[in-house]
Amino acid sequence: MILSIENSNAPLQDYGIQIPLLADRYTRTLESVSQHPELASHKKAWLLTADPKPFSREQLLRVHDEQYVDALLSSDPVQVMGQVFEFIDADGKFNDRYVASPNNRPMQELVEKRLAHAAGTLLACEAALQRSFCYFLGGGAHHAMRSGGRGFCLVNDLLIAVRELQFRKKIGRVWIIDLDAHKGDGTAEITQGDPNILTLSIHMAKGWPLDEDSPLDAQGHLKRPWWPSSVDIPVPEGAESAYLEMLRQGLRQLEILSCGHLPDLALVVDGSDPYEKDVLKSAQPLQLSLEQCIERTKIVHDWLRLKKVPQAYVMAGGYGPENWRVHAGFLKSVLPEYLP
Ligand SMILES: [Zn+2]
């Protein structure tokens, strides 16, 4: 099952934010999957469209602190959005990523649209619990931390969805398996000490958000907070040929840490920025081929399916005109298994 959200397309430029995040990854993935010979005539069986309500204040507070949530839901969220989308510098000044204009749409509206889009992750998790597999064409804001959004990630949709379902007693234990090129550091920070959520992140060994060569200074003190995932797999530059085996080993480690208790749900963060044709400079140290990208997600999928763990997917990072191929390639390889 694929989940596609309607009415959530809100180009940042309409709000004065000059960041060219492409939304056509969603539509191109869907178009490509729709043309698959086995899937074309069964669209109703695998496509779910929805128009979710934005996450509520109460749902946000299960993950983020009150000060951040209040700032986000205030009548003037420009400052807080400036930090998330990096158009306000550390000294509080606007940079050239923001163009003030009377024609800009209100920033409050952008917050609302983003929170509605993020709520798609909750719908995808619910669909996965019912149908064993759901892939959301969106979501995956894994850099958002408890005290606020960062790195273009407004709120941590993964954890808001998980905590909401735990609150409703629909699920207990959860695995979050993060395949994005960048470490899922927000997810790791928020889940520290939570025995019911285990996290795995396979990511570039160096580069944002792990900019330091060593997290320790000359005196052996942490230069800045360092949040481990339950299983971290840092991939050194040039080690692409070892990537799939490193992932397999990481999955085994995750299972060992679970002490024989399978989770009620697995959330997979299927970032396509490890793809060699991704154009984001900060993702360049990891250069997987298209085949390797598809295979990595398939390894996770087949492993979870064998264990009968319901699986929900989000797209996370992916920059450039070719990234849709990663998502579409994976979906075309597994969706026919789920046809009635
Ligand atoms: Zn990324």
Image (spheres, rainbow, N blue to C red):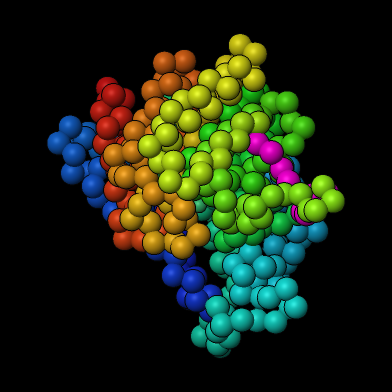
Give the magenta range. 221-229
Report x, y in % for residue 151.
Answer: 60, 60
User: What is the quadrant of residue 37 in the picture?
Assistant: top left
Where's residue 288, x and y in %? 37, 45
Residue at the image position 55 percent from the left and 58 percent from the top: 114
Q: Is residue 16 left or right of residue 242?
A: right
| Residue 259: % across, % down | 65, 13
Q: Residue furthest bottom?
A: 102
Is 87 placed left or right of 3 in the picture?
right
The picture quadrant where one finds residue 20 is bottom left
Q: Is residue 316 visible?
A: no
- Residue 211 painted magenta: no
The quadrant of the image that shows the C terminus is top left
Outermost front residue: 218
Provide the major secondary structure of the magenta segment: loop
Residue at the spot 35% in from the left edge and 52% down from the top edge: 276
Q: Is residue 161 above or below residue 24?
A: above
Q: Please provide percent x and percent y for residue 141.
A: 56, 50
Residue 188 falls left or right of residue 7: right
| Res 278 seen here | yes
Furthest toward the top, the residue is 260
User: Where is 139 relative to 330, above or below?
Assistant: below
207 and 31: which is toward the camera: 207
Residue at left offset 53%, top offset 34%: 177
Could you tell whether 183 is left or right of 18 in the image?
right
